Image: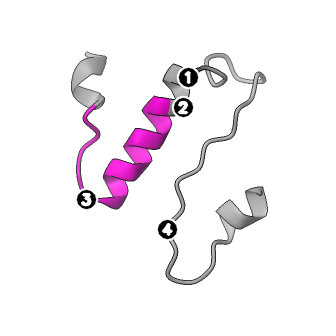
């Protein structure tokens, strides 16, 4: 799957999240939402709506 994310087919945008316990905090539902929402917002040319709540 990481190959697909690193080398997506032409004209395809990828939003990916890999669950890992190697890095603290990257194996929670909150981390998934934060990272994927930020990626999807960037694909839409928007700022992540979660950025306002992180302050």
Q: Percent position (x, y) of residue 28?
A: 60, 20
Q: Which residue is mark 1?
A: 29
Q: Percent position (x, y) of residue 10?
A: 57, 84
Q: Classify 10 as above or below 44.
A: below
Q: Earlier in the sequence, mark 2 or mark 3?
A: 2
Task: Looking at the picture, tell me which residue is in the foreground, 49 or 55.
Answer: 49
Residue 45: image tag = 3
Residue 32: image tag = 2
Q: Which residues are magenta?
A: 33-49
Q: Tell me, yes or no, whether the two marked residues, 1 and 2, touch with CB atoms within 8 Å.
A: yes
Per the picture, the main secondary structure of the magenta-coloured stretch is helix
Q: Which residue is mark 4?
A: 13
Q: Earlier in the sequence, mark 4 or mark 2?
A: 4
Q: Classify 2 as above or below 26.
A: below
Residue neighbourhood size for the residue with mark 4, other residues' Cα within 10 Å, grouped as few (<14), some (14–19), many (≥20) = few
Q: Residue at x 24, y 44 (%)?
A: 47
* Discs 2/3, front: 2
Q: Give the Cα separation between the discs numbered 4 and 3.
A: 13 Å
Q: Percent position (x, y) of residue 9?
A: 63, 79
Residue neighbourhood size for the residue with mark 3, other residues' Cα within 10 Å, grouped as few (<14), some (14–19), many (≥20) = few
Residue neighbourhood size for the residue with mark 1, other residues' Cα within 10 Å, grouped as few (<14), some (14–19), many (≥20) = few
* SS under mark 1: helix
State yes or no: residue 37 in magenta. Answer: yes
Q: Residue at x 44, y 31 (%)?
A: 34
Q: Give the Cα separation between the discs numbered 4 and 1.
A: 22 Å
Left or right: 8, with 46 as reference point: right
Q: Give the Cα separation between the discs numbered 1 and 2.
A: 5 Å
* SS under mark 4: loop
Q: Residue furthest front?
A: 29
* SS under mark 2: helix
Report the quarter where the N terminus lies: bottom right
State yes or no: residue 10 in magenta. Answer: no
């Amino acid at each position: 799957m990481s190959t697909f994310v690193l080398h997506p087919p032409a004209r395809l945008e990828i939003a990916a999240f890999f669950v890992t316990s190697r890095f603290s905090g990257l194996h929670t539902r909150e981390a998934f939402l934060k990272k994927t929402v930020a990626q999807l917002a960037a694909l839409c040319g928007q700022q992540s709506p979660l950025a306002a709540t992180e302050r």
